Structures are given as structure tokens and as C-alpha cells.
């Protein structure tokens, strides 16, 4: 997709300041007047979740032997013809509806000609000129890591959504000094989503990709396993000053993770600023992201526009879909029927968490943005026969559970603690059998221990249960008053903070196994007596 016209349309811009942190992938958010402004647009290739390829019956599979999933058509054997995969079109329509696109009643397929070893036909079948859908919009929350300000919402317009086939893969053997071709990916169905250049920072781009992953996963349109190449991101980046024309853009290809999207864009913004500040020139080129060195590296020059010689695909008729839902004898795809079967989308879930379950918007964003974390929330708060507070569950997952995982450098999806064990900790918290401190200890012991114990068993074995006996609490408070005469004297002279110093001493002596609110109330009564 060419960005020549799109990049000239009312870009949203922001002030960029030079900072060494940008090269490390941290967003620059502090504005300065009359400084450089950046413009970012994304192109996303999402592999459609399908058992067979877009134009052939060959199986789609990852990690299998090279050239073991290749049909005669995929290898461009003369005389073979493409047959469009209906399920792939339905997935494309479903995705377009979720992104508020205008679906075309009639779309066309084109041949895009270029010559790579892994493209045996010498052209790619795509929908360049008459795509399946146009004109959508994706609105998404942006949370900047390490920045305490509240999340904000951003929107990016979708220029078009088109269906196309993937190419094969070139394999280079540096020892044998040979290049080989694997055609397992040749013909794999893709959706290309071309977004307008409405973004400003790498963090906004990463947030867009994250929201898109959430939507595609719920729709079942794409597995979104970026480590398998199921979702690939290209970023178009340029900078300019206020009241000046847009700058020359560079394209960073095939970024392979959400975090790398932010890092690559922020690095490229900073690289362009450095060049222009030193009096240099930005070249229109394609670059790649090196995740090891955390730098973009040049791949090829784009100053001379490549002529892809687009032409209509002669072996495929126009693609008709039933947009209006009018009954027809033809077996066309019914857009209105697909629309009625759309699942609840991420933003709808966030609103429900706020309006129905009384969670804060920030809590709703954190929960929904992590698929596994939200599954834990659902399993715990919606367990049949239980009446757990959703707000209590959300607070526990966000504040205690994530804290323990961060301490152990674990991602939520890699954590071995099942939902029913987390639910047991929540029940112990709600029943005042433990406090949040003890809850974190239990979670840590669950990660460290190989005993396969439930949380209640761990709490009993380690004596990590709250002290609830009134006589015992009375005794502890009286001992604290007796053993700390100086604190008591200062309190009685008007230094009320000494009360909390006494409570802190009790917390230390009991290893924080006492309800401190009760202890403070009891200390007040003892000190007045």
C-alpha cells in the first residue's frame, strides 16, 4: 500500500524532545515548543485463522517440515487455478465489521508483480485497488509504561482492509553458502490492515497493535502469535517541524512483537532527529528492526518508486458479498447475519466492568488488555455458587498477583497458578483469614514450592493466618503499651502519630498477622484508660 497520498492528510502531531531513553524503547512524552514532531502510520499483516490456504486446499501449519504443505497451485505449476476460500472471506468481513468499516458489495483481486525467489508465480494475488473494506476506525486505550499519568484514548482511521496471499520463505545457510526456499507459507491467507498516519509515538503504535490483537483473538480471525509470524507489523515514520511540510518517511518492516513496535518507532524517531539536527538528510528507505542491538538497519532504498505493474487477476471473478441482507438465490456471504454473531469486543467489556461491576476505568483497561488476566478475573468473579466482589477480585489480581509476578519476572500467561487457587486466596482475603501481605506470601510460596499444595494448606503449614482471638489481640496491645513507655508518653503529650508507631511495633512482633484497624482502635481505648 502506498502512503504518498495518505501521509498528506491532516496528520496528528506532537512535540518530540531528544532523550537517550528513546533509543531504549521508552516513549517521549514531554512536549517542547518548536521542536520536531513525529507522524506514524501502521500496516498490519494478520494471518487468517484457516485450516487451508487462501486459493488452494493445502493445509496451513506452523513448524512442520519444509515444503510439506504445498499444493500444485502454491508452487505455480502451469495449468493450476485459484479457488477462493470462503471461510477466509467471512473472517475478513467479521474483522471489518468489528472495526466499523464500510464493506464493499463488490471487491476485486489484483496481481502485484515482483520477483523474489520465494514468490514462484512472480506475482502476489491481493486486493490493492478494490479492497474488501474501507474507512474503519480503531479506538484504543494507551498506557505508557513507567509513566504515572492516567491512560488516555486514541483513534486511528483504517484506510482499507484487503485479502491477499503470503509468499514463501527464503532460508539462507551461511555454512553451505546456499539459499533454499520453503513454500509452506506460500498462499497462506492474510488480511492486510492499512491504518492512516494518525499516531504520534511508539507507545501509541504498540497500544494499537495490542488492541487489534485483542479484537482479532475474540473474533477468532487470527491467532496473533507474533512469534510464529501470524501477525507482522510495518511502521511508516517521519518527522517535521511546526508549519513545515511533512518529512521524508522511512518504513520499518516485519516488527515481531508488541514491545518491539514501541522500541523500533521510538528509535527511528530519534535517529531521524539526530540526522536532521546534524544537517543531514533522511532517505526514503526500508529498514529492519534488530532486536539484539535495538536499532533499525537499512534494507533497501525506496527513492525510486518500484513499479508493481498491478493488473486485474484474470482467474478470479469479482467477489460479491450481500451487504444489505437482501435475500438472494445466490450463495453469497450475508454481512448482516455475520454482524449478529459478533462477540463482545474489548471496549464493550471495559464499559461493562465499569458500569456493572463498579471497577475504575484504569482497572478495566489493565484487566481486559491482558487476555490471561481477564480469564482469571472471569473464572474467579463469575464462579457458579460464589458471590465474590468483582472489585475485590480485580484489586487482588492487579495489586497482589501482578506484584508477585513482576517480582519473579513472570508473564501472566506463563504463571502456573490456576484460577481456582487464586480464587481460594480471594476467599481467604474476603473472610479476613489473611491480609494482602499474607496473600502475597502465599502466592510466592506457591511459585517456589513443589508440594502442589492449595493456598489454604500453605497458610496452615506456614502459620500465615490472621490472629482473630480477641483475648490474644488485647494481650498484644497491652504488651505493646507496657514495653514502649516513651512512645506512650509522647502520645499522651499530644503526638498522635505515636499511636501508629505502637501499632507498627505490634505488626512487626506478629509478622503482620493482626488486623491493624482493630489494633489501633483497641490501643486508643487502652491509652485513654
Image (cartoon, helix red, strand yellow):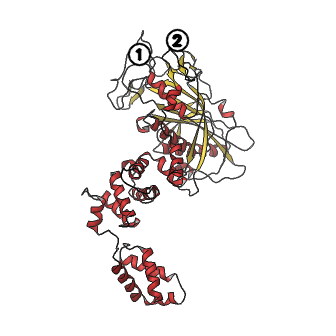
Horizontal relation, residue 463 to residue 326: left or right: left
Nearest to the observer: residue 227 or residue 379: 379
The residue nearer to you, when weighing 59 against 317, is 317
- According to the picture, the residue beneath numbered tag 2 turns out to be 314
Residue 191 visible (yes or no): no
- The secondary element bearing badge 1 is classed as loop
Relative vertical location of residue 274 with respect to residue 158 in this rendering, above or below: below
Q: Residue at x 68, y 43 (%)?
A: 279
Front-most of 390 and 34? 390
Dot 1 crowding, Cα within 10 Å, few <14, some 14–19, many 20+:
many
Secondary structure of the residue carrying numbered label 2: loop
Specify whether 185 is left or right of 336.
left
Is residue 208 depicted above or below 389 in this figure?
above
The percent coordinates of residue 193 (x first, y second) are: 54, 31
Quadrant in which the N terminus is drawn: top right
Q: Nearer the viewer, residue 50 or 471?
A: 471
- Using the rendered view, name the quadrant where residue 63 is placed: top left
Which residue in the structure is indicated by mark 1?
73
Marks 2/1: CA–CA distance: 15 Å
Please indicate, yes or no, whether residue 320 appears anywhere in the rendered image.
yes
Residue 256 is situated, as x and y percent measured from the top left of the image, at 46, 39
Residue 27, image x, y percentages: 57, 50
Residue found farthest to the top? 79
Looking at the rendering, in which quadrant would you find the C terminus?
A: bottom left
Q: Residues within 10 Å of mark 2 (few under 14, many from 20)?
A: few
Is the residue 339 above or below the residue 349 in the image?
above
Residue under the image location 48 percent in, 90 percent down: 489
Amino acid at each position: 500500500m502506498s502512503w504518498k497520498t495518505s501521509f498528506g492528510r491532516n496528520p496528528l502531531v506532537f512535540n518530540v524532545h531528544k532523550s537517550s531513553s528513546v533509543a531504549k524503547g521508552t516513549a517521549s512524552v514531554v512536549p517542547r515548543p518548536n521542536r520536531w514532531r513525529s507522524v506514524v502510520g501502521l500496516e498490519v499483516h494478520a494471518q487468517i485463522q484457516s485450516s487451508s490456504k487462501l486459493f488452494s486446499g493445502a493445509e496451513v501449519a506452523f513448524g512442520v517440515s519444509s515444503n510439506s504443505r504445498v499444493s500444485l497451485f502454491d508452487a505455480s505449476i502451469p495449468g493450476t487455478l485459484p479457488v477462493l476460500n470462503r471461510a477466509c472471506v467471512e473472517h475478513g468481513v467479521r474483522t471489518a465489521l468489528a472495526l466499523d468499516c464500510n464493506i464493499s458489495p463488490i471487491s476485486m483481486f489484483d496481481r502485484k508483480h515482483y520477483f523474489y525467489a520465494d514468490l514462484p508465480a512472480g506475482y502476489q494475488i491481493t486486493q490493492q485497488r478494490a479492497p474488501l473494506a474501507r474507512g474503519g476506525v480503531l479506538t484504543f486505550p494507551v498506557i505508557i509504561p513507567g509513566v504515572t499519568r492516567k491512560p488516555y484514548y486514541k483513534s486511528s482511521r483504517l484506510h482499507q482492509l484487503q485479502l491477499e496471499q503470503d509468499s514463501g520463505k527464503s532460508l539462507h545457510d551461511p555454512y553451505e553458502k546456499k539459499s533454499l526456499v520453503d513454500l509452506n507459507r506460500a498462499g497462506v491467507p492474510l488480511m492486510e490492515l492499512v491504518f492512516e498516519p494518525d499516531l504520534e509515538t511508539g507507545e501509541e503504535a504498540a497500544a494499537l497493535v495490542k488492541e487489534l490483537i485483542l479484537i482479532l483473538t475474540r473474533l477468532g480471525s487470527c491467532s496473533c502469535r507474533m512469534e510464529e509470524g501470524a501477525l507482522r507489523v510495518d511502521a511508516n515514520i517521519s518527522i517535521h517541524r511546526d508549519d513545515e511540510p511533512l518529512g521524508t518517511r522511512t518504513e520499518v518492516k516485519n516488527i515481531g512483537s508488541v514491545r518491539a513496535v514501541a522500541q523500533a518507532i521510538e528509535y527511528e524517531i530519534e535517529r531521524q532527529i539526530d540526522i536532521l539536527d546534524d544537517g543531514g538528510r533522511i532517505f526514503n528507505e526500508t529498514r529492519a528492526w534488530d532486536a539484539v542491538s535495538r536499532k533499525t538497519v537499512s534494507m533497501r532504498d525506496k527513492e525510486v518508486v518500484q513499479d508493481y505493474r498491478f493488473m486485474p487477476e484474470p482467474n478470479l471473478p469479482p467477489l460479491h458479498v450481500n451487504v444489505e441482507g437482501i435475500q438472494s438465490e445466490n450463495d453469497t456471504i450475508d454481512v448482516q447475519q455475520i454482524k449478529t454473531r459478533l462477540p463482545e469486543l474489548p471496549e464493550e467489556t471495559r464499559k461493562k466492568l465499569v458500569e456493572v461491576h463498579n471497577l475504575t476505568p484504569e482497572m478495566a483497561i489493565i484487566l481486559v488488555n491482558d487476555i490471561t488476566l481477564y480469564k482469571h478475573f472471569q473464572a474467579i468473579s463469575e464462579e457458579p455458587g460464589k458471590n465474590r466482589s468483582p472489585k475485590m477480585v480485580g484489586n487482588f489480581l492487579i495489586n497482589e498477583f501482578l506484584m508477585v509476578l513482576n517480582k519473579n519476572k513472570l508473564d501472566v500467561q506463563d504463571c502456573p497458578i490456576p484460577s481456582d487457587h487464586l480464587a481460594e486466596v480471594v476467599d481467604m482475603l474476603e473472610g479476613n483469614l489473611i491480609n494482602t501481605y499474607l496473600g502475597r506470601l502465599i502466592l510466592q510460596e506457591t511459585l517456589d514450592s513443589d508440594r502442589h499444595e492449595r493456598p489454604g494448606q500453605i497458610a496452615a503449614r506456614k502459620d500465615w493466618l490472621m490472629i482473630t482471638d480477641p483475648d490474644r489481640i488485647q494481650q498484644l496491645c497491652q504488651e505493646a503499651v507496657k514495653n514502649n513507655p516513651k512512645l506512650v508518653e509522647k502520645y499522651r503529650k499530644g503526638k498522635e502519630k505515636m499511636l501508629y508507631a505502637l501499632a507498627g511495633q505490634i505488626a512487626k512482633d506478629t509478622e503482620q498477622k493482626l488486623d491493624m484497624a482493630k489494633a489501633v482502635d483497641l490501643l486508643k481505648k487502652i491509652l485513654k484508660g
